[in-house]
Image: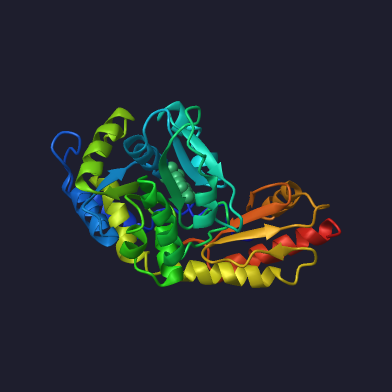
Amino acid sequence: MSIPVDLRSDTVTRPTPAMRRAMMDAEVGDDVLDGDPTVRQLEQRVAAMLGKERALFFPSGTMANQTAIWVLAERGHEVYADAGAHVVHYEMAATAALGGVQIRPVSPSGDVMSADDLEQSFRPPSRHAPRASLVCLENTHNGAGGRVTPLPALRALQEVAVARRIPVHLDGARLWNASISLGTPLDALASCADTVMVSFSKGLGAPVGAALAGTGQAIDAAHAVRKRFGGGMRQSGILAAAALHGLDRHLGRLTEDHEHARLLASALEGVHGIRVVPPDTNIVMIDLPPEVDAFAIVEAAAREQVLLTPWSRTRIRAVTHLDADAAAVLRAAEVIGEAMRGRGG
Ligand SMILES: *Cc1c(COP(=O)(O)O)cnc(C)c1O
């Protein structure tokens, strides 16, 4: 039996022995009572990296996104977001259920919402229509296959929002990947938004955590909302130590994940009937011909110890990460090829 290959997400990584040691050695305090020194260190480091006044540690990216929406958007108003965004599909309608705001999904004309798409989606002023309160961006864009939005496009999106005096939140769960792929500094990308969420539990390999960065005023407000959401954590320095270790040791190696994604894409090129979306970062979208069921292919691959995500009836998602080397992605390509041949693809 070969070693299992799990490409369902970059969240499946397990903390390395060195990361676990860093967690064990972390200096801690009660972060709800009067502060945890390691959490403080992480928050200051992330704020500096993103060029923001302050940052706040969160148990999850979802909570950080929803906190930003709560802080920046007004109840009864609308949040504009790409129709394929994480906040639209994977956050349990928290925007409506908790924040009291409605999402206006913007259908992108290309892979990801552009400034034009955004501009054209605004409603004409009317006494009956909800007002626009916030624009939410996502970089890299998960649903679009880890697509990067380059700096000029981000700036253009920001300008559309600024012209309407609307703030911008950036869901940057994988902003690290975007920065590396584009060769654009994190703070430049982050400068296109008022608040930015980054995740430590994706490519950086930490077990838990995200941060929200912004002005001191926004982060003060976010602190209160995090408390309301039940996100106050006590000796959270243990978790912050894992995130700091990820920044120290795993940020630079994200290029390897991008190389492995390209390797997987090129290894699948020869498989009859398959069309692979050329990856910008660590996410590979594999499109199957309409007569082949993605769920059946994913099941067949799982029987061979290769785990993938059926993204839709005809699309499979594979994500490269810290725990998947070149041999692992080549094994995945081989198993997908076998599964396709088994189905006459
Ligand atoms: C994973 C992810 C999130 C949510 O992060 P969690 O820590 O899993 O809650 C938000 N946005 C994007 C784009 C993501 O990929």
Task: Compare residues 49 and 230 and report the one nearer the observer.
Answer: 49
Furthest toward the right, the residue is 344
Task: Compare residues 109 and 323 and report the one nearer the observer.
Answer: 109
Residue under the point 53% across and 59% down: 146
Furthest toward the left, the residue is 34
Vertical position of residue 16 compared to residue 123: above or below: below
Indicate the quadrant containing the N terminus: top left, top right, bottom left or bottom right: bottom right
With 137 as the anchor, is 217 left or right in this view? left
Residue under the point 39% across and 56% down: 159
With 177 as the anchor, is 239 left or right in this view? left
With 199 as the anchor, is 259 left or right in this view? right
Vertical position of residue 68 compared to residue 55: above or below: above
Q: Position of residue 51 (x, y in %)?
A: 26, 60
The image's colouring method is rainbow
Vertical position of residue 222 compared to residue 195: above or below: above
Residue under the point 36% across and 42% down: 64
Residue under the point 69% across and 53% down: 315
Q: Position of residue 309 (x, y in %)?
A: 62, 50
Q: Is residue 214 visible?
A: yes
Task: Compare residues 196 and 129 and report the one nearer the observer.
Answer: 129
Q: Is residue 21 visible?
A: no
Q: Position of residue 196 (x, y in %)?
A: 35, 51
- The quadrant holding residue 63 is top left
- The quadrant holding residue 264 is bottom right
Q: Position of residue 321 (x, y in %)?
A: 49, 61
Task: Compare residues 21 and 296 and report the one nearer the observer.
Answer: 296
